[in-house]
Image: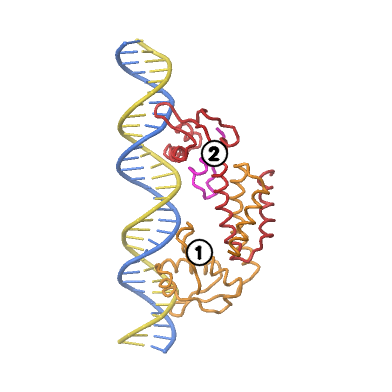
Chain colours: A red, B orange, C blue, D yellow
Amino acid sequence: MDIIISNASGVPIYEQIEEQIKSMILSGDLAAGDALPSMRLLAKELRISVITTKRAYEDLERDGFIESVVGKGSFVKGINSDLMKESMLFAIEECLEKAADKAILGKVSLSEMQEMLSIIYEEKKNG
Amino acid sequence: MDIIISNASGVPIYEQIEEQIKSMILSGDLAAGDALPSMRLLAKELRISVITTKRAYEDLERDGFIESVVGKGSFVKGINSDLMKESMLFAIEECLEKAADKAILGKVSLSEMQEMLSIIYEEKKNG
DNA sequence: ATTATTGTGTATATTCATTATATACACTTT
DNA sequence: AAAGTGTATATAATGAATATACACAATAAT
């Protein structure tokens, strides 16, 4: 399981895990029925506490993406892919809203923002 | 002093105050030498603690935007307007980066984001 | 088959950092 | 003296992350 956590980002670890697992489900890297790494194993790999992985899996279960059964493990559920994309778009929207708020306060134009976004996006995608 | 704080946003109150005062300086609503409302008065207007306004003014002073002198009050300093804009752009950049991260994970294209951003920006600016 | 072991998820109590607070203090002006 | 400034100390409330012990299931050893 290729999950990368960054302490510098300010994003809570459990959220980073959630986002990346959702992404793998969306992209097909994880299919319905697939087993996730156990909370303990993932915690060991990432050098974090079991409780943090549990927090992530707990949220994913609450939101209907996975299912955990004691003694057996955690598994990907059948997902409505459209709903999934909806949830992703919503998270993106929240970030863009914050950026727009700051931009308007700071008298930064839309085209300036578009330019910035374009550079950032391509940078992240390629470099 | 027209400062609006929103508890729903998740942004700390002191940060909201800082952003809005910076914005007023940048736009010219506040000029060098102008007196800010006293910490106590602003706290009273916003129905928050003096300590929170102090925290905001403290940060603004640390960053060179204002100056506080005991017994007298807090005042806007002479500002390098370019540096100011730099600092605003940096904050916007951070938000856009988070959005871009999520977009790439979620297989959301750049043009989709541009479209979202455009709608959000215009909505906030006009509506 | 029974039992011990190992691997699952779960629950409790705790630590740490951040945000926000009440209250009392020190200084300046009037 | 009084009323207005900014300042400092001690405290509460929340959220992120943790260590440790608990409960259940599958498996290997006997």
Residue B16 percent coordinates (x, y): 50, 64
The residue type indicated by label 2 comes to: Lys
Using the image, name the chain to which the residue with label 1 belongs.
B
Q: Is residue A3 magenta?
A: yes
Q: Which residues are magenta?
A: A1-22
Residue at 52% from the left image edge and 76% from the top image edge? B75
Q: How many marks?
A: 2
Quick check: A77 left or right of B115? left
Q: Quadrant of the N terminus of chain A?
A: top right
In space, the residues marked 2 and 1 are separated at their CA atoms by 32 Å
| Mark 2 residue crowding within 10 angstroms, few (<14) / some (14–19) / many (20+) | many
| Chain containing the residue with disc 2 | A
Secondary structure state at the residue bearing disc 1: helix
Q: Position of residue A102 (x, y in %)?
A: 58, 61
Q: Is residue C16 left or right of residue C22?
A: right
Residue in the picture at 47% in, 31% down: A41
Quadrant in which residue A55 is drawn: top left
- Which residue is disc 1 drawn over? B16
The residue indicated by pointer 2 is: A22
In this rendering, is residue B1 above or below B112? below
Which residue sits at x=45%, y=76%? B38
On screen, A60 above or below B13?
above
- Seen at 61% across and 72% down, the residue is B27
Q: Are marks 2 and 1 in contact (CB under 8 Å)?
A: no
Q: Is residue A88 left or right of residue B14?
A: right
